[in-house]
Image (cartoon, helix red, strand yellow):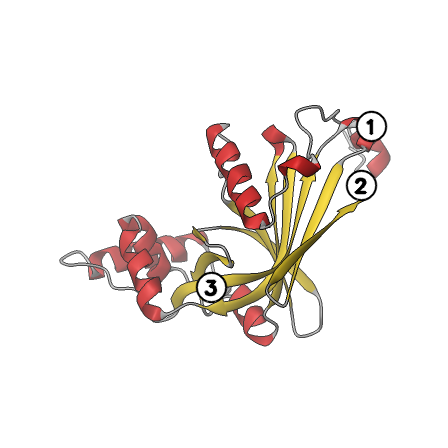
Amino acid sequence: MNRSTSADSMATDISSLRERYTKGTLEESELPENPVYLFQTWLDDAIKAKVNEPNAMALATVDADGKPNVRYVLMKGLSETSLRFFTNYESRKAAEIEKNPTVSVVFWWGELERQVRIRGSAKRISDAESEAYFNSRPVESQIGAWASPQSIEVKSREELEDSFQQTREKFANGNIPKPPFWGGYEILFSSIEFWQGRPGRMHDRVEFTLQNGEWSRRRLAP
């Protein structure tokens, strides 16, 4: 029996999918001078709500032709001026950051009907800081950092599995050092936007912008 693959024949009516957001508001009285404090509060709320991977963020970069790429990574550090994540310095994302350090990230905490958008400039952290974090990772994650040539084409899943096993055997008798091609980036904040879902699509949006070391804010229409 032939099956149509046209959009009209899809079983799910995607156009009818919608939610009514009612779980919170974002009032002026809740806004601190420094938006990082509100971000930390929202992150803590997401952790308490047992959001899956509350530190997961979609990281957007652009290639040499100005074409965007986006992927999820895990935030692994937060300060008043920046956030951190770790990756392979030979990966696609790293190559794009080296050519254009301006990036954007998005956190989505659906259980709380909240979104945070952050823009900033990414730069490598020190090798010592990267090594300290690497040493705290589970052994399998350390092995994976060595075994995976991130963003490079591989012939098969079996090739990856073989590389992982060979790396495990290579470091079977001692500590696993940080690969020289692996480490962290920090994203220095330039703007942070908070989004809280509201009924009738009349959502709350507040954007903070950093200029000359001072934060300013404005409310945006949803």
> Looking at the figure, which quarter contains the C terminus?
top right
Report the amino acid beneath label 1.
Answer: Gly
Q: Which residue is mark 2?
A: 222
Q: Which residue is mark 1?
A: 200
How far apart are labels 3 and 2 at the CA level?
A: 31 Å
The picture places residue 2, in percent across and down from the top left corner, at 78, 33
Q: Earlier in the sequence, mark 2 or mark 1?
A: 1
Q: Which residue is mark 3?
A: 185
Q: Earlier in the sequence, mark 3 or mark 2?
A: 3
How dense is the environment of label 1, judged by Cα within 10 Å: few (below 14), some, or many (20 and up)?
few
Give the farthest residue toward the right. 8
Give 173 or 24, whichever is nearer the viewer. Answer: 24
The picture places residue 144, in percent across and down from the top left corner, at 35, 55
Give 57 or 16, whichever is nearer the viewer. Answer: 57
Tell me if 52 is positioned left or right of 138 in this view.
Answer: right
Would residue 150 be seen by someone viewing this image from the given angle? no
Residue at point 13%, 58% (across, down)? 173
Report the amino acid beneath label 3.
Answer: Tyr
Tell me if 50 is positioned left or right of 197 in this view.
Answer: left
Residue at point 38%, 70% (across, down)? 181
Q: Quadrant of residue 21?
A: top right
Residue 89 vs 174, above or below: the answer is: below
Residue 146 vs 202, above or below: the answer is: below
How far apart are labels 2 and 1 at the CA level?
A: 11 Å
